[in-house]
Amino acid sequence: MDMATAESQGSDWVRIFDTTLRDGEQSPGCTMNVEEKLALARQLERLNVDIIEAGFAASSEGDFESVNRVAQSVKGPLVLSLSRTRDEDVDRALKSVDKSTRPGIHIFIATSDIHLKYKLNMNREDVLDAATWAVTRAKKHLDYIEFSCEDASRSEWEYMAKVCAEVIRAGATVINLPDTTGHAIPEEYGRMFAYMREHVPGAGKVIWSAHCHNDLGLAVANSLAAIGNGARQIECTINGIGERAGNCSMEEVVMALKTRKDLMGIQTRVDTRQIYPSSRLLSQIIGQSVPANKPIVGDNAFAHEAGIHQDGVLKYKLTYEIMKPEDIGIPSNKLVLGKHSGRHAFINRLKELGVDTDAVDLNSAFAEFKALCDKKKVVYDDDILALVTEEARRTSDEIELVDMRCSSSSKETPHAVVTLRVNGEEHSADGEGDGMVDACYQAIYKIAGVHPALERYAVKAITGGTDALGEVSCLVRDNGMTVAGQGAHSDIVMASALALVNALNRLKSRKEAPLKPTTDVP
């Protein structure tokens, strides 16, 4: 009996297939290095997702290494690599997961006529043959095989049913029907699953999966419609990141099922208390803040401004809150530690906040915490999370910020002197600009020897008060490459410098890595 059949005969639940490390990373500015992917994969394991799509092994040596290391590091979830229907792709994907305790492969090819004609230059029989061949080849090496009909929502159902029947016969255990372009609407997308489950021979032997993009803002709604019509796997990403307008948001679909279990009658096995820590970790890694109005994890998700709402919530929370913030792991923002707190209390609090303490230099982090306590009157959970993440960024970067001095006056041009450590050697330069941040950036550009375009610069106070840690995110572009950077510090100019240095390290890493082939994927 194959794994999918065995699972389908057990208790009924919706499997969460997380593709943050693959599809999510394809979002502009969201590139992650190997160590960052490992940190996120470990958090996904704590989140208790069922499947991790760790990357596209054949696309580059960097992606192969990422998939391979994730496959060896996590033990609970299945670990998959994406693969086209090519022998080199299939072989590379299989090799990347061969040391996993629960390996799998995700094979895809387009089935819509528009993709066949304009992208693949193949006819329907060619696609059918390629799909069947790839699944057959993979089946010789492992049991868990997912097959995707790319652009399923724009494919002819009768032909797609034929393809699905053949790949099931060849050994596929999961069939994915992606809304690759975000074109579908819920009623239509749900009917497609109902049709396929009714007309495909062997439909009851496999798990049916939905992979929705958010171009029309319907990714979560379409995913729920698929579940209502028999899908038992949802492919999604943390914070909904991904190609173009993004993917189905993991936290939204999971909490929709949990909150409306009265209607849906089925849930996931996700530990929802790890949702907020997962969201924050991804935000810190990719240098992109979560919008305040983002459902579930945005800063305003549990905030009440209107007087009527405030009055109702004070009297009885359920008047305006359909979820409890504790259910998704939102920290209380109470004073948890201070300058008299010991190392043990600090480490224990990091664990409560979902931090992988094995991946943190605890001596350095505790020293930074003590220094922060001397600067701030109140230290919040979010301050601690930002501090630890910033410390991790500094220790892994080739370019480090050593010192920065800035001066500004209403009568003089702002001036900055910056010292960076580049590959172990210290270099200093000065710069002038329209403000202290601009002056600082000009000095950093001189030392780094690059002058990328600054496409985005944003400042956010992590916690309240004039002594709050400031979080700066920036997006820079150089020679067609776009990367994000992030920094946190009680001095906003210092946070700005840290963000740019972080972005330059990412840019350097991207330039050294082999380019990924341009290819459409589900």
Image (spheres, grey):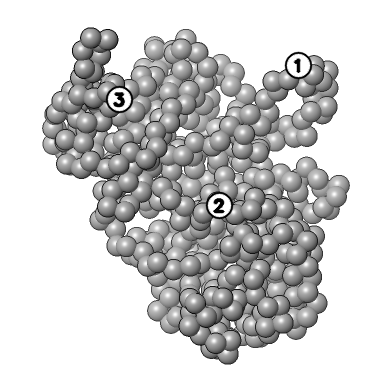
Helix or strand or loop: what does disc 3 sit on? helix
Q: Distance from label 2 to label 3 (Cα)?
A: 31 Å
Tell me where residue 268 appears, x and y as whole percent.
71, 52
Which image quarter: residue 492? Answer: top left
Give the alpha-carbon distance from disc 3 to disc 1, as whole Å. 39 Å
Q: Earlier in the sequence, mark 1 or mark 2?
A: 2
Residue 221 appears in the rendering: yes
Is the residue marked by circle 1 packed among few (<14), some (14-19), or many (20+) residues within 10 Å?
Answer: few
Read off the residue under disc 1: 307
> For mark 3, what is the residue?
437
* 222 up-or-down from 137: above or below: above
* Amino acid found under the numbered disc labelled 1: Gly
Q: Which mark is residue 246?
A: 2
> What residue type is disc 2 on?
Gly
- Of residue 403 and residue 92, the one placed in the foreground of this image is 403
Q: Residues within 10 Å of mark 2 (few under 14, many from 20)?
A: many
